[in-house]
Image (spheres, helix red, strand yellow):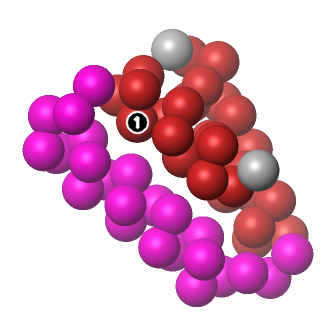
Amino acid sequence: MSKNIIDSLDNIKKLIEEENYQEAINYIEKTKTEIKTGRDVSNYMDSLINDLK
C-alpha cells in the first residue's frame, strides 16, 4: 500500500511540475473524498495511478 501512495504522490508532483494545477487539485480532492468515504485506500490509490497512466 505504501508504494501506491508514493506513486500517487509522484504523479501529483509530475502534474504540478507540468503546470497542470487544476488536474492536480482535482486529483488531490478526489483522493481526500474517497478516503473519507471509507473506500479501501489501497484499491483507491491503484485506481488513481491507473487514471493517470
29 vs 44: above or below: below
Say left or right for 19 vs 26.
right
Picture quadrant where residue 4 is located: top right
Return the x and y of residue 44 as percentages of the image width and height. 40, 36
SS assignment at label 1: helix
Q: Residue at x 60, y 77 (%)?
A: 23
Say left or right for 42 vs 9.
left
Return the x and y of residue 26 as percentages of the image width and height. 47, 73
Residue 31 counted in the magenta span: yes
Say left or right for 37 vs 30.
left
Say left or right for 14 vs 8.
right
Residue most toward the right? 18
Q: Give the residues drawn in magenta, as a range.
A: 18-40
Picture quadrant where residue 17 is located: bottom right
Q: Residue at x 25, y 41 (%)?
A: 35
Residue 53 counted in the magenta span: no
> Alpha-carbon neighbours of circle 1 within 10 Å: few (<14), some, or many (≥20)?
some
Picture quadrant where residue 15 is located: bottom right
43 vs 24: above or below: above
Q: Residue at x 41, y 26 (%)?
A: 43
Say which residue label 1 marks: 44
Return the x and y of residue 48 as percentages of the image width and height. 54, 46
Q: Magenta stretch mostly in which secondary structure?
A: helix
Q: How many marks?
A: 1
Q: Amino acid at mark 1?
A: Tyr
Q: Residue at x 75, y 71 (%)?
A: 16
